[in-house]
Image (cartoon, coloured by chain):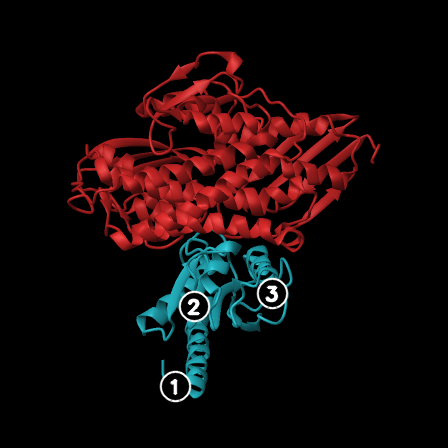
Amino acid sequence: MTHSSHRLLSVGSLARVEGEGAMHVRIRDGEVESVQLSIYEPPRFFEALLRGRRYHEPVDITARICGICPVAYQMTACQAIEDACAVTVDGQLAALRRLLYCGEWIESHTLHIYLLHAPDFLGLPDALTLARQDRALVERGLRLKQAGNQIMEVLGGRTIHPVNVRLGGFHRLPDRAELARLSALLRTARRDAEETVAWTAGLDFPDLHVRHAALALRRPDAYAIDSGTPTLHGALTAAAGAPLAAFPVAEFEQHVVENQVPHSTALQATADGRRYLTGPLARWRTSADRLPRDLRNLAAVAGIGQSCDNPFRSIVVRAIEVLWAVREAQRILDAYEPPAAPAVPVPPRAGVGHATTEAPRGLLYHRYEIDADGLVAAAQIIPPTSQNQAAIEADLRAFVQERLHLDDEELTRQCEQAIRNYDPCISCATHFLDLTVRKD
Amino acid sequence: MSDVRGPGGTAVIAIGNEYRRDDGAAQAALRLLLRDGAPADRCDLTDGESTRLLALWRDRDLAVVIDAVHAHPGEPGRIHRLDLAQAALASGGATTHGLGLGEAVELGRVLGLLPSRLVVVGIEGERFDWGEQLTPAVAAAVPRAAALVRELLEDERRTTERTSGPR
């Protein structure tokens, strides 16, 4: 333990998060003075890159923003540009898109649960140590994740940066044999997902309760993933009552405002002036009642009631969402009838279009302005991690304040675990571990 | 790990991000290989995430991974060849996707998911900031890296033909 009056924790590059980020905590005279989560995020680069491109190109270009959630970017870009072109994709094509999105949720959540977050709860340094200690556990995670990979490969053409998605639908429809193979994989995946829920429920969770507002999509008929109404609640707890606001996607930027902060290339957002969370806990707050009753019962047994305000328990919510995504994928496959064509026409026209979807990490918003020549005149992308950044910093401040008795190494380790609660997708392809702990 | 088992044969796996300047070197090399008809059973571009690598190379006779690397001191454009099925790759080591590839190799070893032979062809990069252009030294190295990959694949094909006849 360090009793010096000044203390600075600095993690130059966060491990086991997607991409690049750093954390700096400054403590003075026993009080947390500041917490800064520095994120180097690419959407600003991509917004500039998109200007002047043909209107169909953002679907493929924005998929490169993130290797872990390219489908979220593609689905949101498709719907926003189709909105600008006054085209709605529905029926079996929309169902196939939803199936593809389920694949990404299964893959991304399972990666996070088993390989990024589980070692924290088990007191292990990394997934490799976990594999040595409990091979069957990691094999179950890899098997479950592979089901998501295979959905993405069949629907998207490949497992990263899918190439089979286009405005209006797909370049090629899956054949019966491919879908039958997915159905077989999903039968095993369902059992693995059920076991995953039970396993995460048995983990030990540090005590932390947060009071952020929650922003997520809500649909009247289903758990929202690929569409819905942005809905803002004042808190994560159900006792807070009815939503503060529910607004059309086209009004998103009137409610959600991004601000530049000096320590990060990612903008920080507020919703109607409030710091808020998006992602699994916000979705749970907003749409848990849209899940099948037996899933809600399973969640209750796992310690997740109608609401959950402990970010450490988000691993359980992710596990439930994986099980839901597996079942939703099965439902779509069971009801599938091949559409008449792999895509509907989307002729360009001048206009502005908006879309929001639920990426695994939270709400993702795209806006595109298309000019009369079918070129992108402007693009706006608000990813989930920048929306969560202010709330993560606030949580870290409270978290550290309660744990000042820990030495620097243990405090830093626990802070990293706390950050991983939010599965930050700090998209990029490089990260270098450079951990330093300095004391003034 | 999967119900879908790889069929043996050869795989080329390019890791990188074409929008991070020299991090796109592997993709550029893969593009050359595909243009000229890569003698591999499967070619993939990926982001270096460890479980995807395991899925791509498991059960292969030979997997060649192309990746951009750092070295200290560095010499942009220099090409490294690492045989990894037997040797460990230090975590946070040479590759710009260090933990991903290093962890994938070690996870594969623990879980029995390594290919029979795994070779990494690393291209030393100079700049990894946002942008689409390779630096000149790296751009010049791309054809040499592609030629090395082709040589590895041809060697494997000849070895296979010697032991079991033409595929």
Mark 1 and mark 2, same subunit? yes
Left or right? Give the position of A247 relative to A199.
Answer: left
Q: What amino acid is labelled 2 in the image?
A: Val
Chain B tint in image: cyan
Q: Which residue is mark 1?
A: B165
Secondary structure under the numbered disc 3 in the rendered image: loop
Rendered view: B4 above or below A414: below
Left or right? Give the position of B47 relative to A418.
Answer: left
Q: Which residue is mark 2?
A: B12
Q: How many marks?
A: 3
Quarter of the figure that contains the C terminus of chain A: top right
Residue A281 appearing in the image: no
Mark 1 to mark 2: distance in Å?
A: 22 Å
Where residue B57 sits: x, y (%)? 47, 64
Image depth: mark 1 or mark 2 in front: 1
Left or right? Give the position of A119 relative to A297.
Answer: right
Where residue B47 sits: x, y (%)? 46, 55
The numbered disc on residue B71 is 3
